[in-house]
Image (tube, rainbow, N blue to C red):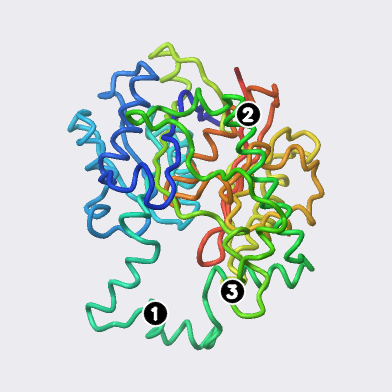
Amino acid sequence: MAEAYIVESVRTAVGRRRGALAEVHPVDLAAFALRELMERSGVDPAAVEDVIMGCLDNIGPQAGCIARTSWLAAGLPEGTPGVTLDRQCGSSQQAVHFAAQAVMSGTADLVVAAGVQNMSMIPMGSSALAGESLGLGTDSLARSIGWHDRYGDTPVSQFHGAEQIAAQWGIGREEMEAYALRSHERALAAIDAGKFKEEIAPFGDFETDEGPRRGSTPETLAALKPLSPGGRLTAAVSSQISDGSAAILVASERAVKEHNLTPLARVHQMSVVGSDPILMLTGPIPATHRALERSGLRLDEIGVFEVNEAFASVVLAWQREFDVDPADLNPNGGAIALGHPIGASGARIMTSMLQEMRRRGARYGLQTMCEGGGQANATVLELLT
């Protein structure tokens, strides 16, 4: 079977809500990552055959196939098409899957996989709320007979799912808060050590992730009010609303030779699964099982694990299932500290994971993300350089 290689990747620093990137037009935010990717790769942009970009809430400044408009806004060739996709939080991880599948099928040789989100400018869920202006209400499933026949009136909410996961796996608030503190501590340690310098392209003078907080203590976290009465979740154990973009160049073996590229990693395995849409966020568990089964790898052969920190309960439930060394799980913090620009997070995490694999000399890394609707992607990379 043909192989798919990652030959370059880059990201912006992640901006916090109403932070450094809040007023940047999403098209320009994505264009920046695309332009930086092509400059770093040294590849003639005219050789890129498609741009696949994750982005949610495609309304207003994020409408109009932002994959295409951002490529053009970057000053890149008009002959390259683009397509925008929505697999919820895993959208740009799915973009990597689609890019790799195009290369492995032989229908393309060079494909850009990317993601962007400006959640400060366009709040999460804006596309569903837009239905209200059309007289359709704010619940996107309210009028679906088939959905209600199957699932009734059970709340469909990531917050409800995360609470249910905490209850089902016996994860208490203190445990989640301790995990959240660790995420911030690891992210700050990584920033202080300069670990993200190579992967981040400075957007003007903005070059440091804004989300990680210094000075939090168990006492300050314990004082926060739960998100729902009697619940275990607080803002501190949830991913941050954020802004950012990231881009990855995927190449075939033929493209690697033709353009004299040095592959960083091989896309070793790709999986995507569906799971309970009410619990919603448990998908990383079966996605990881499938990735391991199909790759033939054992857990102890994988040196770095990235499980998106949508909520602390999601990662802790996954850890209960697989019992990996905590030092190998989200070693430089995750979305609780670094932020979660939803359309861009998959490519951002993969970019960071690849750099950590290189620092450690880890042959394999596994990334997985929970997604709206009860879904999850899992990707295994094999380090080559």
Image location (x, y in percent) of residue 295: 69, 40
Category of crowding for the residue at label 2, using alpha-carbon neighbours closer than 10 angstroms: few (below 14), some (14–19), many (at least 20): many
Q: Please report contact status of discs 1 and 2: CB closer than 8 Å, yes or no.
A: no
Q: Which residue is disc 3 drawn over?
A: 160
Label 1 SS: loop
- Mark 2 or mark 3, which has the lower sequence index? 3
Identify the residue at image location x=36%, y=42%.
Answer: 20
Above or below 110: residue 347: below
Above or below 124: residue 1: above
Category of crowding for the residue at label 3, using alpha-carbon neighbours closer than 10 angstroms: few (below 14), some (14–19), many (at least 20): some
Above or below 144: residue 90: above
Q: Which residue is disc 2 drawn over?
A: 356
Image location (x, y in percent) of residue 274: 58, 63
Category of crowding for the residue at label 1, using alpha-carbon neighbours closer than 10 angstroms: few (below 14), some (14–19), many (at least 20): few
- Mark 1 or mark 2, which has the lower sequence index? 1
Q: Is residue 83 left or right of residue 252?
A: left
Amino acid at the residue labelled 1: Asp
Q: Quadrant of residue 166?
A: bottom right
Label 2 SS: helix
Q: CA distance from mark 2 to mark 3?
A: 33 Å
Say which of 36 and 151 sits in front.
36
Q: Which mark is residue 139?
A: 1
Label 3 SS: helix
Say which of 325 and 202 sits in front.
202
